[in-house]
Image (spheres, grey):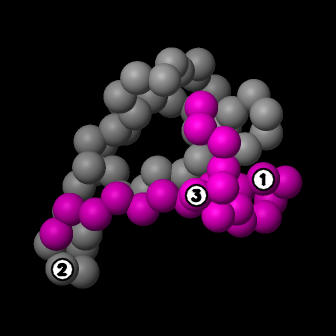
């Protein structure tokens, strides 16, 4: 998810996506359905934040 301030929020581990690239979404818009990790069969979400192509501590990134 690319925010207007240039931050990119990456949500990985989805089995199915409900949005497409370039689509505008709101704060409570469902973006996907979590799937099982192929290595251990357990559902896991992976969350990363980037700004200007560099990783940002998710705890320090602005909330949308």
In the rendered image, residue 49, in percent from the top left (x then y), is placed at 63, 55
Numbered badge on residue 16: none
Dot 2: within a 10 Å radius of its alpha carbon, few (fewer than 14), some, or many (20 or more) residues? few
Q: Is residue 45 magenta?
A: yes
Residue 43 to residue 7: above or below? below
Q: Which residues are magenta?
A: 42-64
Which image quadrant: the N terminus? top right
Distance between the alpha carbons at the discs numbered 2 and 3: 27 Å
Q: Secondary structure at mark 1?
A: strand
Distance between the alpha carbons at the discs numbered 2 and 1: 31 Å
Dot 1: within a 10 Å radius of its alpha carbon, few (fewer than 14), some, or many (20 or more) residues? some
Numbered badge on residue 40: 2
Q: Going 24% across and 73% down the picture, which residue do you hit?
A: 38
Numbered badge on residue 59: 3
In this orientation, which residue lies closer to the viewer: 52 or 37?
Answer: 52
In the rendered image, residue 36, in percent from the top left (x then y), is placed at 20, 63
């Amino acid at each position: 998810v690319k925010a207007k301030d240039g931050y990119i929020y990456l949500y990985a581990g989805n089995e199915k996506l409900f949005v497409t690239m370039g689509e505008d979404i709101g704060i409570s818009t469902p973006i996907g359905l979590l799937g099982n990790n192929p290595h251990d069969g357990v559902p896991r979400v992976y969350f990363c934040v980037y700004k200007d192509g560099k990783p940002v501590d998710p705890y320090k990134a602005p909330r949308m």
